[in-house]
Image: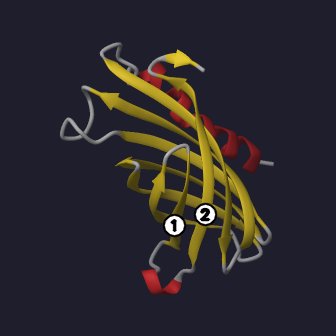
Amino acid sequence: MFRFPLVLLLFCCPLRAHAYGIGDPDFQNSIFAGVRVSYQKSLGFGVGVHSSYWVIGDAMIADMLPYSATAGAGWYQRGKLQYVGLQAGNFVGVSAGLFAQQGQLGSFTGKYYDVWGAWFGGGSIRQFMKWGEGFRQTSVDLSLFGSLPVIFDGRIR
């Protein structure tokens, strides 16, 4: 009962960034929404949704690297997970953040990292690790995804 509002909140977090002043008119901001198909040895195959609020322009990292807040949810054969994080990149990038997972393996939280490559579609290698687990204790999540701008350069698409 609590999980659906949590998924909705996590998915909408990047969309609320504009209301908190991140959408300064001097920035060229974009919101992307997408879907993904994933496979993880422990969870099986899954589908998911994600949203990212990208800052492009004057506020970029080192004046050349876009960054974003991202949130998403995935429904796998043996469980569900939700995540929020930060990412940076331009065609290729990295992400890191926090996640919550429920399912046959139990309910727990932890951290994740992601290495991705994309231009409206792409692929990623992610790893969701419980608190206290190392890289070798957790299976890798392989994903193919597509995303499109919902708002691009401040204009609704």
**Spatial distance from mark 2 to mark 1, Cα to Cα?**
8 Å
Report the side of 104 relative to 143 (left or right): right
Residue 53 on image: x %, y %: 48, 34
Res. 134 visible in picture: no
Residue 25 on image: x %, y %: 35, 13
Q: What sort of colour scheme is used for the picture?
A: secondary structure
> Which residue is denoted by mark 1 in the rendering?
126
Amino acid tagged 1: Arg
Residue 63 versus residue 114 in the image, above or below: above
Q: Residue at x 62, y 47 (%)?
A: 146
Q: Residue at x 26, y 29 (%)?
A: 59
- Residue situated in front as seen by the camera: 14 or 103: 14
Q: Residue at x 47, y 80 (%)?
A: 133
Residue 44 versus residue 46 in the image, above or below: below
Secondary structure of residue under mark 2: strand
Marks 2 and 1 close (CB-CB < 8 Å): yes
- Residue 120 position by quadrant: top right
For the residue carrying disc 1, how many other residues have a C-alpha within 10 Å: few (<14), some (14-19), or many (20+)?
many
Say which mark, if any, is on residue 143: 2
Res. 150 visible in picture: yes
Secondary structure of residue under mark 1: strand
Amino acid tagged 2: Ser
- Residue situated in front as seen by the camera: 91 or 131: 91
Report the side of 150 relative to 65 (left or right): right
Residue 123 on image: x %, y %: 55, 60
- Residue 10 position by quadrant: top right
